Amino acid sequence: MRYKKGQIVFEFVIASLIVFAVIFYTIAFVSGDFNSRHVRYSSDRLEENAVRVTEMLAGSTGNGIFSEWPKLDTVKMQDFQSMCTTDYIGLLDNLSLREESPYISYIHMNLTVSDGTTTYINCGRTPPEGEGKAVINRYGLSPANKIARISLFLW
């Protein structure tokens, strides 16, 4: 069979359409999977940071609020609350809750320490409704010798 210049073979058109359909399907599949992986990665990263921050708070040095485990220290909790009130962004820096790529942003927090009758720390912003936050609860012994709940929300 001889073809003239400029003619398109019907089989070539069908094969081209199939190749473009497969490429389009692959791109759509990969981009959809990427979004779900990104959401899972963000959630896991928040959980990791929340556990790390509560471990820092459980210490007796630095930003720790315990005199020794499991006894909460009144003075350290007052210092923490004071820093939260006067320099919230500085506190986030001290807790390593700064993310620097592609621009500087912060992981915000809400920390509450209460034994049911007394609230020792109420620090941070109000957590948003819905998903996209990590919640960690820990317990210690308050200065009044009651079980105190330490609730940390990160978003």
Image (cartoon, rainbow, N blue to C red):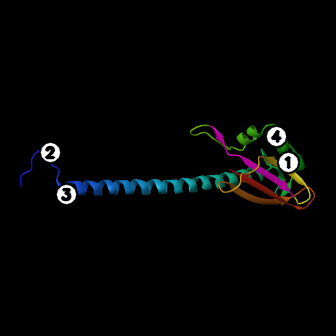
Please name the amino acid that badge 1 sits on: Met
Please name the amino acid that badge 4 sits on: Met
Mark 4 vs mark 2: in front? 2
Residue 78: percent from left, percent from top: 87, 45
Vertical order, 126 against 149 (above or below): above
- Earlier residue among tags 1 and 4: 1
Question: Is 35 part of what is drawn in magenta?
Answer: no
Q: Secondary structure at mark 3?
A: helix
- Earlier residue among tags 4 and 3: 3
Mark 3 vs mark 1: in front? 3
The residue at 59%/52% (across/down) is: 42
Which numbered dot is residue 11?
3
- Earlier residue among tags 4 and 2: 2
Q: Secondary structure at mark 2?
A: loop
Residue matched to label 1: 77
- Earlier residue among tags 3 and 1: 3
How far is the residue under mark 1 from the one under mark 4? 10 Å
Q: Residues within 10 Å of mark 1 (few under 14, many from 20)?
A: some
* Marks 1 and 4 close (CB-CB < 8 Å): no
Main SS of the magenta part reads strand
Q: Is residue 115 left or right of residue 35?
A: right
The residue at 61%/55% (across/down) is: 43
* Marks 4 and 2 close (CB-CB < 8 Å): no
Mark 2 vs mark 1: in front? 2
Q: Secondary structure at mark 4?
A: helix
Which numbered dot is residue 6?
2
Question: Which range is magenta?
Answer: 104-114
Residue matched to label 4: 83
Please name the amino acid that badge 2 sits on: Gly
